Structures are given as structure tokens and as C-alpha cells.
């Protein structure tokens, strides 16, 4: 889920361009594996919301990435001048699932060496998270969830590297964990007592510092997956809009 180093800075489009270049088969395989890692969960959630049972959805995930992404060289067909990569991927997925008629046919398409490890998928958790959503919103929610996890991991690593581990833990306890777990945030007084901070104002400033890092990392990640600052703003607006809709649905 993200982390330190060049792996976080690798963009979707740069992955595609490198695959399209005349690189070694091993390097191409590693680049494609990184892209699959980022998108298999949104694809799985989308298929479940389309009505496919768990096992068939897992089969279709394997088949889609094996047949379409690899077999039909989908990445080489992608064109960043025509919009977002995930929109392009979802269009290709729609075409693929439309062509699948029976579960038996999908099972025959499963490669012997599976590209995506789905055995450890928390099926109940993903199904509950997608309950009541349209297939498209389910896909986007899973994509956003994965994005936020990667950004949080990057910010955490940066804080530790800069000697701001306490900053991170206060931010996590006060901001991130309550949002992700849908719980009430602890008071600043409790956090000061827990981490040995003299004043609540200092704790508040530490949280602001990490918030700014989070916002910067999120924008950087989005900017690396689009082709302009305008698209970055559109992605941020879309993420905020989806989260608002999901919050209203839970009320």
C-alpha cells in the first residue's frame, strides 16, 4: 500500500508508457503487476455490484486481467490525451463482462498461474462496503479507498523519516482513525496526556502539519495519474462528491 521510494512516484501513465517501450519481458511484467495491484479491488467490487457471486467475480477478475489487459495488450491502446485511465479501464471491463455468458465459460478462461491473489479477500467486508451502491460507485469507492490507503502510508513514512512520528500518531488518532472507523475522535486533552504534550495548541499545530502533508501527497498522487492540473481539480471534486453521497446514504 504505497510506501517510501520510487514505487509511490510511479504514475499510471508512466507505467503504460514504459510497458509500451521496448523493455525486457521481466520489466514489463513487473510494471503491469504494479498497475494490476492498484486496480484489482475496484474491478472486483464493480463485478459484485453487477450481481456476480463471489467466486464468479473472482474468476472474471482473473480473466479480465489475463485476457484483456495482457492478452489484448490493453495498456498499449490507452491514450492519455483521451481522458482518465480508470475511465478507459472501466469501459474495457464493461465490454468484457458483457461478452461473458456463463460462469463455466469464465472459469475456463482462468490462467493456471493467477495474476491476482484473491484467496485472502475479505468478501463480507467488501460486500458490506458496497451494499446499496451502483456498480460504478462501488468501483470508484474501492479505487478511492485504495488511493487513500496509499497516501496515508506515504505520509506516515515521511513523518517517521523526518522525526515526526508523534505528529503522525496524533493525526491518526484524532483525524484518520475516527473517519475510517466511524468513531468519535478523542479530545486534544486526552491526546496531550497520551503523548506527553504540554499544550493543546501544540497538538493542534502538529495535526495541521500532517494534514498539509496529506493534502500535498493526495494532490501529487492524483497529478501523477492525470495529464493536467485541471484534471487534478476534477478528480478531487469527484472524490469529495462521492464521499458526500456515501455519507448521505449512511444517514
Image (tube, rainbow, N blue to C red):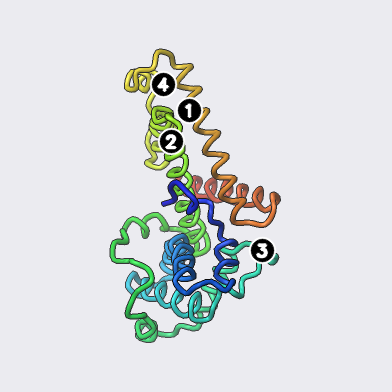
Say which label, 2 or 4, has the lower sequence index: 2
Left or right, 193 with respect to 142, comes to left
Label 3 element class: loop
- Callout 3: 10 Å neighbours few (<14), some, many (20+)? few
Q: Which residue is mark 2?
A: 161
Q: Which residue is mark 1?
A: 207
Label 4 element class: helix
Q: Are marks 1 and 2 in contact (CB under 8 Å)?
A: no
Q: Which mark is residue 188?
A: 4
Q: Are marks 1 and 3 in contact (CB under 8 Å)?
A: no
> Is label 2 or label 4 in front?
2
Say which label, 3 or 2, has the lower sequence index: 3
Is 85 above or below relative to 1?
A: below
- Callout 2: 10 Å neighbours few (<14), some, many (20+)? few
Spatial CA span between label 3 and label 2: 35 Å
Spatial CA span between label 1 and label 4: 10 Å
Spatial CA span between label 2 and label 4: 25 Å
Left or right, 237 with respect to 49, comes to right
- Residue at the top extreme? 198
Say which label, 4 or 3, has the lower sequence index: 3
Q: Are marks 2 and 4 in contact (CB under 8 Å)?
A: no
**Residue 138, position as x, y percentages in the image:** 47, 60
Spatial CA span between label 1 and label 3: 35 Å
Q: Which mark is residue 83?
A: 3
**Residue 118, position as x, y percentages in the image:** 33, 66
> Is label 1 or label 4 in front?
1
Say which label, 1 or 4, has the lower sequence index: 4
Q: Relative to the observer, which residue lies in front, 250 or 149?
A: 149
Q: Are marks 4 and 3 in contact (CB under 8 Å)?
A: no
Left or right, 105 with respect to 244, comes to left
> Is label 4 or label 3 in front?
3
Q: Relative to the observer, which residue lies in front, 38 or 137?
A: 38
Amino acid at each position: 500500500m504505497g510506501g517510501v521510494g520510487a514505487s509511490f512516484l510511479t504514475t499510471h501513465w508512466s507505467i503504460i508508457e514504459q510497458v509500451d517501450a521496448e523493455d525486457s519481458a521481466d520489466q514489463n511484467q513487473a510494471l503491469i503487476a504494479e498497475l494490476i495491484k492498484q486496480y484489482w479491488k475496484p474491478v472486483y467490487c464493480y463485478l459484485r455490484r453487477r450481481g456476480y457471486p463471489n467466486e464468479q467475480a473472482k474468476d472474471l477478475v482473473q480473466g479480465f486481467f489475463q485476457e484483456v489487459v495482457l492478452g489484448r495488450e490493453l495498456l498499449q491502446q490507452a491514450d492519455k490525451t483521451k481522458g482518465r485511465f480508470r475511465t478507459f479501464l472501466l469501459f474495457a471491463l464493461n465490454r468484457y463482462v458483457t461478452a461473458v455468458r456463463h460462469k463455466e465459460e469464465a472459469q475456463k478462461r482462468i490462467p493456471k498461474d493467477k495474476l491476482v491473489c484473491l484467496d485472502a479477500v475479505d468478501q463480507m467486508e467488501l460486500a458490506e462496503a458496497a451494499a446499496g451502491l451502483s456498480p460504478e460507485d462501488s468501483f470508484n469507492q474501492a479505487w478511492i479507498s485504495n488511493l487513500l490507503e496509499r497516501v496515508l502510508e506515504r505520509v506516515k513514512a515521511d513523518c517517521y523519516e523526518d522525526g515526526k512520528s508523534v505528529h503522525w500518531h496524533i493525526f491518526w488518532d484524532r483525524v484518520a482513525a475516527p473517519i475510517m472507523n466511524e468513531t468519535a475522535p478523542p479530545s486534544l486533552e486526552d491526546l496531550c496526556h497520551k503523548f506527553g504534550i504540554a499544550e493543546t495548541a501544540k497538538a493542534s499545530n502538529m495535526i495541521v502539519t500532517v494534514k498539509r502533508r496529506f493534502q500535498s501527497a493526495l494532490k501529487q498522487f492524483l497529478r501523477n495519474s492525470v495529464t493536467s492540473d485541471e484534471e487534478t481539480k476534477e478528480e478531487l471534486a469527484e472524490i469529495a462528491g462521492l464521499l458526500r453521497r456515501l455519507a448521505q446514504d449512511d444517514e
